[in-house]
C-alpha cells in the first residue's frame, strides 16, 4: 500500500510537466492550424470566382518546387520525415518545415491542385512541438512524445475531432502497434488544440447523416462487403500515388519540373471537363454525397486528380481527398447494397482513410465524433475490414510494421522474405 501511494505521488510531477508541455504545443498547433484554415478558405473562394487561374498551376508548381529545392531539401519528406524522427530521434525538425509546407499547400489550393490539408497541419504541429523540445532540452525519448503530441494537436485542430486526433498520433506510426507511453500528452494536445482553433474562429464542416438503419444480418453483411471495397480503394490510392512519385523522380531529374508537368496535366483536364469538381478540398461534393445520389464515377475522378497532384510533387495532404473518395464511393454503392446514401457515404468517408492510413481505431472514433454514436458499430466494422483489406501498404511510407495484420499475412511475408534471400 505504501509503495502504491508513493508511485501515485511520484506520478504528479510527471503529469504536471507533460500537461504544461502539451498545452504549450496545443496552443502553437491550434493557432497555426487556425491561420492555415483561414488562408485555405480565402484562396479557395478566390479560385472558385476566378476559374481561369488554373492555367497558372504549372507555374505555381514550378515555383514551389524550386523553393523546396533551394531551401527545403531536408524537409521535403514531410510526414515521413516526422514519423522517422519519432522512431529514430536524431536531429531537431528544421523550423522552416512549417512555413514551407504552409506556403506550398496554400499555393496548391489557390491555383487548383487536388490536395488535402491534414499533412500541413500535422507537419506544422510536429515542427513547432520539436522546437519546444529543443528549447527545453528534452532527451530523445521525450522528444518523440512531444512530436507525437504536435501531430495529434494539428490533426485535431484541422478536422475538429480531438479524440480521433489524439488516437491518430498514437496509431499512425506503426501498423498493428500503438504508443501508449504518449497517451497523456497526445490527448491533452488534441483536446486543447481543437479548443484553441474554435476560440480563434475556426468553423468545421457538419455532415448530416439523416438515416442509420437498425443492426441486422443484412446491414452487417453489407457493411462488411463495403469495408472490403473501401480497403481495396485505399490500397489502390496509396500504391498509385507512390508509383507515380517514383516514376516522376526517375524520369524527371530536376525536381521543380515535376509539379510543372503535373500541374499542366491537371489544368488541361480541368478546363476540358469545364468543372472544378475534382480539385481543391471538394467539401461541397462531400456534403452532397450525404444528401442525394451522385455520378458513380466521382470517386474515380477525385482519385485521378489527387494522385496526379500529389504524385507530381504538390504539397498538401491525402486525408481530405480520401474522405471525398470514400464518401462518393459509398454514395455510389448505396443502391447496390440497399443501404441509405447518408449512412454509406459516412462509412466510406472514414473507412477509405482507415485502409489507406492504417488507422482503424482513429477512423472509427472520428466517425462517432462527426456523425454521432449511432453509427459506431457500422463504422467500426467498415474501418476494421478496410484496414485488413488494404494490405501492408499505406500513404505514409515511413510507417513501420509493428505487428502484421493477420497470422496468415505474417507467414506469407516471412516466406517471401526467405525466398528473396535465397535468390
Image (tube, grey):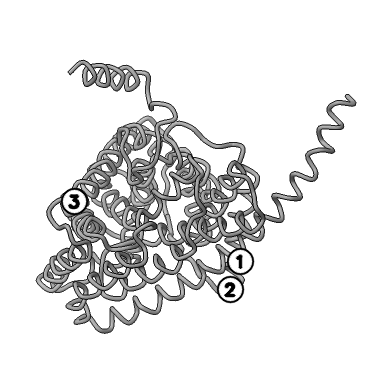
Q: Which mark is residue 244?
A: 3
User: In the image, what residue occupies the spot 43% across and 62% down?
Assistant: 97
Residue at x-position 79% and y-position 45%:
13
User: In the rendering, at what x and y percent does residue 102 appear?
Assistant: 41, 68
From this view, report whether residue 261 is shown above or below residue 242: below
Q: Nearer the viewer, residue 112 or 293?
A: 112
Task: Tell me the CA gap for discs 1 and 2.
Answer: 6 Å
Eye-nearest disc, 3 or 2 = 3
Question: Which residue in the protein does label 2 denote?
Answer: 200
Sequence order check: which comes first, mark 3 or mark 2?
2
Q: Nearer the viewer, mark 1 or mark 3?
A: 3
Residue 346 % position (x, y): 38, 51
| Residue under pointer 1 | 196
Which element is circle 1 on? Answer: helix
Marks 1 & 2, CB-CB < 8 Å contact:
yes
- Distance from disc 1 to disc 3, alpha carbons, whole Å, reads 38 Å
Q: CA distance from mark 3 to mark 2?
A: 38 Å
Amino acid at each position: 500500500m505504501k509503495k502504491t501511494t508513493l508511485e501515485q505521488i511520484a506520478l504528479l510531477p510527471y503529469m504536471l510537466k507533460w500537461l504544461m508541455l502539451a498545452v504549450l504545443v496545443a496552443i502553437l498547433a491550434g493557432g497555426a492550424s487556425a491561420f492555415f484554415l483561414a488562408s485555405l478558405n480565402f484562396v479557395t473562394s478566390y479560385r472558385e470566382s476566378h476559374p481561369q487561374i488554373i492555367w497558372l498551376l504549372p507555374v505555381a508548381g514550378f515555383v514551389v518546387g524550386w523553393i523546396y529545392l533551394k531551401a527545403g531539401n531536408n524537409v521535403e519528406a514531410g510526414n515521413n520525415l516526422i514519423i522517422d524522427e519519432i522512431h529514430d530521434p536524431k536531429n531537431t525538425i528544421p523550423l522552416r518545415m512549417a512555413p514551407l509546407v504552409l506556403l506550398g499547400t496554400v499555393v496548391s489550393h489557390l491555383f487548383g491542385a487536388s490536395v488535402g490539408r491534414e499533412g500541413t497541419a500535422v507537419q506544422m504541429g510536429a515542427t513547432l512541438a520539436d522546437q519546444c523540445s529543443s528549447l527545453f532540452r528534452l532527451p530523445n525519448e521525450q522528444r518523440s512524445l512531444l512530436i507525437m503530441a504536435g501531430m495529434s494537436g494539428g490533426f485535431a485542430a484541422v478536422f475538429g475531432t480531438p479524440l480521433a486526433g489524439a488516437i491518430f498520433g498514437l496509431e499512425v506510426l506503426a501498423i498493428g502497434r500503438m504508443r501508449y507511453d504518449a497517451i497523456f500528452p497526445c490527448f491533452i494536445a488534441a483536446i486543447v488544440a481543437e479548443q484553441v482553433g474554435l476560440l480563434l474562429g475556426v468553423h468545421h464542416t457538419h455532415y448530416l447523416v439523416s438515416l442509420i438503419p437498425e443492426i441486422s444480418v443484412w446491414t452487417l453483411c453489407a457493411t462488411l462487403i463495403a469495408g472490403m471495397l473501401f480497403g481495396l480503394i485505399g490500397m489502390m490510392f496509396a500504391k498509385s500515388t507512390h508509383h507515380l512519385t517514383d516514376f516522376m523522380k526517375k524520369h524527371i531529374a530536376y525536381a521543380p519540373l515535376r509539379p510543372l508537368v503535373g500541374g499542366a496535366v491537371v489544368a488541361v483536364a480541368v478546363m476540358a471537363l469545364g468543372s472544378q469538381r475534382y480539385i481543391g478540398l471538394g467539401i461541397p461534393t462531400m456534403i452532397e454525397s450525404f444528401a442525394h445520389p451522385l455520378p458513380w464515377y466521382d470517386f474515380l475522378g477525385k482519385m485521378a486528380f489527387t494522385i496526379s497532384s500529389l504524385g507530381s510533387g504538390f504539397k498538401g495532404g491525402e486525408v481530405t481527398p480520401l474522405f471525398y473518395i470514400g464518401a462518393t464511393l459509398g454514395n455510389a454503392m448505396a443502391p447496390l447494397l440497399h443501404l441509405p446514401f447518408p449512412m454509406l457515404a459516412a462509412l466510406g468517408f472514414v473507412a477509405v482513410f482507415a485502409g489507406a492510413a492504417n488507422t482503424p481505431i482513429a477512423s472509427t472514433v472520428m466517425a462517432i465524433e462527426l456523425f454521432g454514436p449511432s453509427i459506431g458499430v457500422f463504422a467500426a466494422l467498415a474501418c476494421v475490414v478496410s484496414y485488413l483489406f488494404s494490405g501492408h501498404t499505406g500513404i505514409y511510407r515511413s510507417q513501420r510494421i509493428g505487428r502484421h495484420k493477420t497470422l496468415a499475412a505474417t507467414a506469407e511475408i516471412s516466406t517471401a522474405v526467405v525466398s528473396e534471400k535465397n535468390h
